[in-house]
Image (cartoon, rainbow, N blue to C red):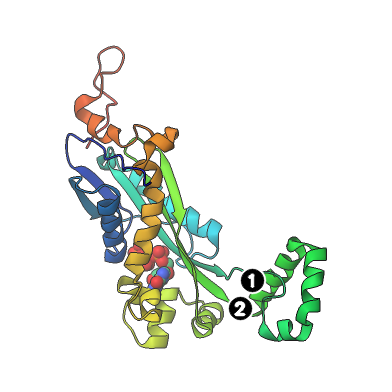
Amino acid sequence: MTVPLALPQLSRPLSVVVASKNGVKINAVAAAVRVAFPGLEHSVRGADSDPGVPDQPFGDEQTLLGAYNRLACLAAEPAHAGSLLCAIEGGVGWAAPAPHGWGAPQQRKAGGEQQQQPQLQQGAQRGAQEDGQQQQQQRQLECFAWAVVQAPGGRCSHARSASFLLPPAIAELMLTEGLELGAADDRLWGRVKSGQGSGTIGHLTGGLLTRQAYYQHAVACALVPLMQPAWYPEHAGEMLDAAAGAEAAPPLAGGSEEGTTGP
Ligand SMILES: O=P(O)(O)OP(=O)(O)OP(=O)(O)OC[C@H]1O[C@@H](n2cnc3c(O)ncnc32)[C@H](O)[C@@H]1O
């Protein structure tokens, strides 16, 4: 049994602001909002933002920070009060290691069944450490993104995209020449601004999964608490605030209208 979506009842169209001018990100957010809140009247626009991390973030921590920094830029703009704010940051990092003993085929062949016994005895932690080092030695990179949303009421929620292994040739260009993923993709495959088109994932999957669709899922996942406030009590009322905004907010103590929110 699926849980019905909780569509916010708004007195005016929901304003959605995306922390990027990259059409891929704007379209990904627009598509996610359409799916998350079907039939809800809304507008979507992109705005400049500063991730405050290297142009090519490395690892989850830096990439998530970049997404939150972008969001902070939007939140600092008074004109965005009462809007749903969304930020996406693309990152790369060391590929997640396979369980101990599953890293390289030659290891499995060499160890055979005996190889599995030490795994149980030594525990997962040592295996993970060894294989983590192995990923670095093998210079295997994965690509992923973090999506962050801030409800009109101010509460944030984030989600990580799926990840995929980057081809060794791309990883080498990034690790040895310091290229961003988009630049490495363009160089290797003779493309132009691939990050604003189908993206590396689009190229590698023959269009089966584009960068936009890939990001749309991450944004939809970040929106889950806002789609189901009954199941996430901390998010209850966060979307309704958009409607409460300037028109319906009660006056502050003393009768002043100052401090009410709204575009
Ligand atoms: O205008 P902004 O929002 O900054 O868009 P961007 O694509 O440059 O922003 P990110 O910071 O999210 O991405 C970091 C880098 O990773 C690149 N990148 C990430 N995913 C990619 C993909 O699937 N295909 C190509 N490049 C990608 C991107 O082009 C950047 O060089």
Depicted 112 relative to depicted 18: above or below? below
- Ligand 1 within 8 Å of disc 1? The answer is no
Q: Residue 143: x percent and y percent?
A: 48, 70
CA separation, marks 2 and 1?
Answer: 14 Å
Depicted 153 relative to depicted 115: above or below? above
Which residue, as the protein is rendered here, is positioned at the far top? 254
Q: Residue 200: x percent and y percent?
A: 40, 76
Q: Nearer the viewer, mark 2 or mark 1?
A: 1
Residue, x 47% and y 77% (percent of image)? 179
Residue, disc 2:
139
Residue type beneath disc 1? Ala
Residue, x 25% and y 41% (percent of image)? 79
Label 1 SS: loop
Residue, x 24% and y 29% (percent of image)? 244
Residue, disc 1:
98
Between 104 and 155, the one lying in front of the other is 104
- Mark 1 crowd level (few <14, some 14–19, many ≥20, 10 Å Cα): some
Residue, x 73% and y 82% (percent of image)? 107
Q: In the rendered structure, are the residues bearing label 2 and label 1 in contact, judged by CB atoms less than 8 Å apart?
A: no
Between 206 and 177, the one lying in front of the other is 206
Label 2 SS: loop
How many numbered marks are there?
2
Ligand 1 shown in quarter: bottom left
Q: Give whichever of discs 2 and 1 has the lower sequence position.
A: 1
Between 92 and 31, the one lying in front of the other is 31
Depicted 34 relative to depicted 207: above or below? above
Quadrant (top left, top right, bottom left, bottom right) of the C terminus: top left
Which residue, as the protein is rendered here, is positioned at the far front? 1
